[in-house]
Image (cartoon, rainbow, N blue to C red):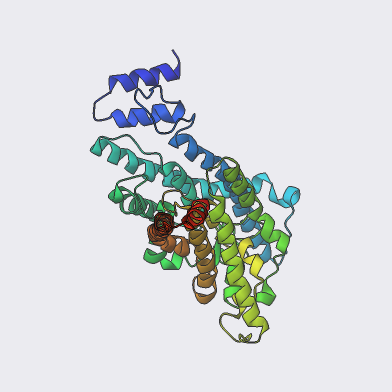
Amino acid sequence: MSLKNNLHQLKEKYRGKKMAPAFNALHTFLYSPNETTHSGSHIRAVDDLKRTMNTVIMALVPVLIFGIFNAGYQHYAAVDAANGIIREASLFGNFLTWDNFIMGAWTVLPLVIVSYGVGLAIEFLFAVMKGHEVEEGYLVTGMLVPLIVPVDTPLWMLAVAVAFGVVIGKEVFGGTGMNILNPALTIRAFLFFAYPTWMSGDKVWVHQAVDLAGGPDAISGETVLGFLAQGKTSEMSYSVADMFYGFIPGSVGETSTLLILLGGLFLLFTKVASWRIMVSAVAGSLIMGLIFNVAVSAGWITETSTFYGLMSFEYWKHLLVGGLAFGIVYMATDPVTGAQTNRGKWIYGFFIGLISVLIRVFNPAYPEGVFLAILLMNVFAPTIDHYVVKGNINRRLKRAKNAMVLPTDGEGKAEKLKAETV
């Protein structure tokens, strides 16, 4: 007997019982639901929410795999640097190696396991307690979380943050589709405010299992933003190609701009993400970065200024470092917490990009502001949509009023025709 039939029998056996949501979730995750709508449906499509979530996960998998290789590569590069050896990245030379993959997997995969294990356990618990079906929203959140936290985050700390993010960030609002804040970013914010020394944003952890001639047991290497925030621009040796391809230290999923770009195109092709939010967010970050560049060129900011490093950083390079590109593609486009109206999406995305660079420059103690910018705009998204809708209603009422108030003399026919064409 096939697995599908066995799951279907278990589903029927536990129908109406306390554990029914758990078996239903497993059945519909592996197979398309075998139930049909007998009344009129609003939308007819071949996919469902689980398949939509899986589409996003498909766009994240290449980023995760690259991040695993990069975590291992950065470890060995830092070990070499501690021994006075400078290693230059070569994709098929010293990057895509089994040593890098094994070292990266050893540190990254536990984060993925804890993220999904704790998050889905809480999802199942709430579903059984409330007697509703298991919601699919955490399928993407569980993948996003290990990609946006430092690789050295203690597993117990991540478990506490995930529990907080799922319960406080989503379940208290009513579950998937009802939350006002992005759950993954809520988890990241909890870690940042509860354990700030672990979330500085300017260090990359390097696992150290060998003795370097009596040296330290662990090595921390600066990220690009760390160099810039501390004004060490002359000491930074990463090229534009390194930044674009992702051969730089940083959080697991945030280094390869190339793969993030390809993932964004995939989401746009499948119509899962909004191109308006992506384009406007990129525009906002470029404009803010250009303003800072102009301020430096005009001499308003000198090299002695605390903000000089990030202000003088070429405006378009902001998209190549840190989590800005990752946040724009995978988190700003969250359809639940983002703006819903077309005009609102332009405003929403623009301010995410602008505020991200603003925080990045003026907060050198934490030179990464994209997650704070997205959370802030999550809060303002309903307000933006409200005023966009209100403005549309007012314009339509004004047009209707002008069309109804018409003169009745002989010249009224021309005025009426003009009003109708408008």
Where is residue 284, by image quadrant? bottom right
Query: For the point 44% across and 68% down, which residue is it?
Result: 197
| Image vertical order of residue 289 relative to residue 276, above or below | below
In the image, residue 351 lies at what x, y percent? 50, 65
Residue 103 in view of the camera: no
Q: Is residue 8 left or right of residue 300?
A: left
In the image, residue 169 lies at what x, y percent? 34, 53
Query: For the point 44% across and 41% down, which residue is it?
Result: 139
Residue 278 in view of the camera: yes
Quarter holding the N terminus is: top left
Foreground of the two, 167 or 317: 317
In the image, residue 257 lies at what x, y percent? 64, 55
Q: Is residue 45 left or right of residue 18?
A: right
In the image, residue 163 lies at what x, y percent? 34, 50
Foreground of the two, 236 or 358: 358
Q: Is residue 110 left or right of residue 102?
A: left
| Image vertical order of residue 155 relative to residue 193, above or below | above
